[in-house]
Image (spheres, rainbow, N blue to C red):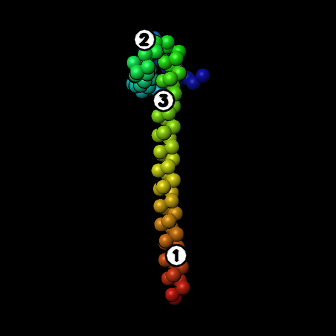
Amino acid sequence: MVEDSKVHQVEIFGQSYNVRGEGDTDYITEVAAYVDKVMRDVSNSTGIADTFKVAILAALNIADDYLALKNKASSEKGEDTEKAISSLVDRIDRCLAEEKGR
C-alpha cells in the first residue's frame, strides 16, 4: 500500500464511501461528484431506482465518454503526425531539388 494514500469520505447516490487514494481531496471529491451526477442523470432519465443497475448504466456512460475522448485525441494526434510527416517530406523534396540544381 502506498504510504501517501489517504482515506477520503465521499457520497455517491445517497451512500457514503471511504475512498483511499493519493489524490488531492478536492480532486477525489470532484470525481465522486461526477459519478454521483451521472448516476442521478441515469436514474432520472430511465426511472430505474435499483442502485446496482444505475451504477452499471452510469459506468457504461462514463466509459463511453472516456473512449470517445480517447479516440478523438488519438485521431487528432494522428492528424498532427500526418501534417508533420507531410511537412518533412516537403522539406526533403526541396533539399533534394536544391542538391540536384547544384
Residue bearing mark 1: 93
Of the residues tagged 3 and 1, which is closer to the observer? 3
Does residue 54 lie above or below 98 as drawn? above
Quarter of the image for residue 34 reads top left
Residue 63 vertical placement versus 90 (above, below): above
Give the crowd class for mark 2: few <14, some 14-19, many >=20 residues within 10 Å.
few
Quarter of the image for the N terminus: give it: top right
Name, please, the residue furthest toward the right: 1
* Residue 91, placed above or below residue 30: below
Task: Identify which residue, 57 or 89, lies in the foreground.
Answer: 57
Taking the spot 52% from the left edge, 27% from the top edge, the residue there is 60
Q: Which residue is mark 2?
A: 14
Disc 3 designates what residue? 62
Residue at 49% over, 13% down: 51
Pointer 1: residues within 10 angstroms few (<14), some, or many (20+)?
few
Q: Residue at x 47, y 50 (%)?
A: 76
Whether label 3 touches label 1, CB < 8 Å? no
Give how far apart the Cα atoms at labels 2 and 1 are: 64 Å
Residue 43 position, x and y percent, is 43, 18
Q: CA distance from mark 3 to mark 1?
A: 46 Å
